[in-house]
Image (tube, rainbow, N blue to C red):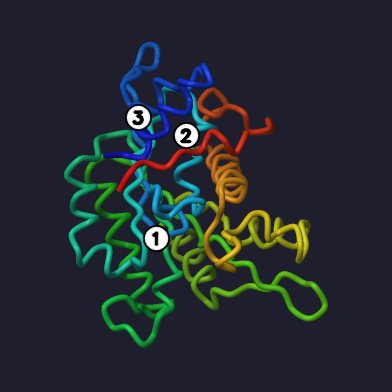
Amino acid sequence: MSLTRRQAGSAALAALPLALAATGTARAAGRRTRTLYIAGDSTAARKYTDEAPETGWGMALPFFLRDGVTVADHAVNGRSSKSFIDEGRLAEILAAIRPHDILLVQFAHNDEKSADPTRYTEPWTTYQDCLRQYLDGARERGARPVLATPVERRRFDGDGNAVPTHGDYPAAMRALAEAERVPLLDIEALSLALWQRLGVEETKTYFNWTATEQDNTHFNPPGAIAVARLVAGELLRTRVLTPHDVVRLHDEIPPSWITWPAP
């Protein structure tokens, strides 16, 4: 089941016009619905009731899209650009993707795990090699590949400055996007700037901080909504989507719109 079917329940209850987009059954006037596939890790993945309030940004992205673009969130916890391919998950997307669809790719959090050969990639060699498989696969099927640098973790130095945590991976992705002439959503830079603006204490309300857990990697509903807003803005800036495709970019999105399905 794609993320968007789960979002439909919340949207319908709120009597919102995105309900058809969330179910994936709407058709844009004069043309078919495009599907935006997400290939990524736990920061983007859909979560279930036993994981709440943890929320992937892919769960919130449909709130910013009109009914001509449907989100199919294939992101999975713990995957890297390599393990996602090795487990057949890219092949599953490529079997379904159609001309004019979009494949949005965000990896690095688990590519960094050098102690795990099933997931580790080196930024300037195997990471780029794996990412090319996503680009080539989408292009061969007439779809549009898009790269998104990894969203930043919540980490501050002693002076209260938000600090990057992804090493050379964002730079390697930026270089690949330029070389391959692929749209790049620079979510790493934008999220780092957002965490800096919010500061040490307020960022806690965007991450999965609970009475029993202090998680500086994964989001709660406000954090997922904030990152999804960055993604939608970048899709618009890079002209992957048009102003007609994007809604509510500057509107308040209630966290109550997020829902979690049963496992």
Work out whether residue 105 or residue 254 is closer to the camera in this orientation and state it. 254
Label 1 or label 2, whichever comes before in sequence order: 1
Which residue lies at the image location 54% right of the left edge and 22% below the top edge?
Answer: 244
User: Quick one: label 1 or label 3, which is nearer the N terminus?
Assistant: 3
Residue type at mark 2: give it.
Answer: Pro
* Residue depicted at 42% across the width and 55% down the height: 51
Cα distance in 3D space between marks 2 and 3:
13 Å
Q: Residue at x 74, y 79 (%)?
A: 157
Question: Residue 191: where, in percent of width, then height?
Answer: 64, 57
Residue 210 lies left or right of residue 156; in this view the side is left
Q: Position of residue 7 (x, y in %)?
A: 42, 33
| Residue 125, quarter of picture | bottom left
Displayed quadrant of residue 128: bottom left
Q: Left or right: 207 with respect to 38?
A: right
Look at the picture and state if 72 lies above or below 79: above
Q: Residues within 10 Å of mark 1 (few under 14, many from 20)?
A: many
- Residue toward you, 50 or 117: 50
The amino acid beneath tag 3 is Arg
Q: Position of residue 1 (x, y in %)?
A: 26, 39
Disc nearer the start of the sequence (2/3): 3
In this figure, what is the number of numbered marks?
A: 3
Tag 2's secondary structure? helix
Q: Residues within 10 Å of mark 2 (few under 14, many from 20)?
A: many
- Point out the frontmost of discs 1 and 3: 1
Give the labeled residue for mark 1. 41
Is 150 displayed left or right of 205 in the figure? left
User: On screen, 66 above or below 256?
Assistant: above
The residue tagged 2 is 62
- The residue to which callout 3 is attached is 34
Residue at x 36%, y 87% (from the top left corner)? 115
